[in-house]
Amino acid sequence: MTNQLYDQDFNLWRESIIDQIKQHRFNEIDWEHLILELEDMGKAEKRSFKSNLTILIAHLLKLTVQADAPETMKGSWYSSVTEHRFRIKKDLEENPSFKSYINEIISQAYTDARKLAIKESKNAKLGVRQPSEAEYPSDCPYLLEQLLDEDFYGESD
């Protein structure tokens, strides 16, 4: 029955699985779909974590490469860095295993972040300098400690 329910009404399926577990009716559980959902849930959390890391790095890059941008532009990048750094730290607190995952994905996130920063910089308007792609380092210039440091914003002092 729960197999059919999975395809017809996901929320009702989820509620019935929870009820079956609470009542220790393990032989009634739709294990196949439950395992798929648990695997997907982990993938979604990792995608979100990587996305936050990518945006954090992209805006640090913009603050570094476009240090001469108007303060109004940089203000939104500072806010974004703070917000995404907070999200990453929260994920690391709630999922300590992500500490090893961050080391696995940092180069992928940097590649995506570099592309994003370059693309966004090409949209600069009103006399704002558009950096060349060569100004963006091909390898991540930030240490993990810097990425997580609340006071680090990538600009040269």
Image (cartoon, rainbow, N blue to C red):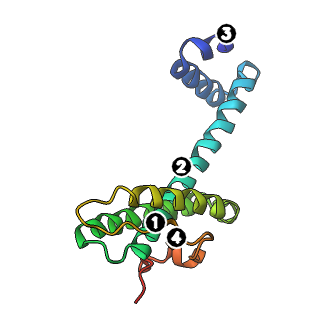
First of labels 4, 1 by sequence position? 1
Please state which amino acid type lies under the numbered disc 4.
Answer: Tyr
Q: Nearer the viewer, residue 90 or 24?
A: 90
Please state which amino acid type lies under the numbered disc 2.
Answer: Ser
| Mark pair 2, 4: CA separation | 24 Å
The local secondary structure at tag 4 comes to loop
Picture residue at 63% right of the left edge, 64% below the top: 106
| Mark pair 4, 1: CA separation | 21 Å
Local packing at callout 1 (Cα closer than 10 Å; few below 14, some 14-19, many 20+) is many
Please state which amino acid type lies under the numbered disc 1.
Answer: Arg
First of labels 1, 3 by sequence position? 3
Give the residue at mark 4. Answer: 136
| Mark pair 2, 1: CA separation | 13 Å
Give the residue at mark 1. Answer: 85
Image-quadrant location for residue 33: top right
With 50 as the anchor, is 61 left or right in this view?
A: left
Picture residue at 57% right of the left edge, 62% below the top: 92
Tag 2–tag 4 contact (CB < 8 Å): no
Give the residue at mark 2. Answer: 48
First of labels 2, 4 by sequence position? 2
Give the residue at mark 3. Answer: 1
Tag 4–tag 1 contact (CB < 8 Å): no
First of labels 4, 3 by sequence position? 3
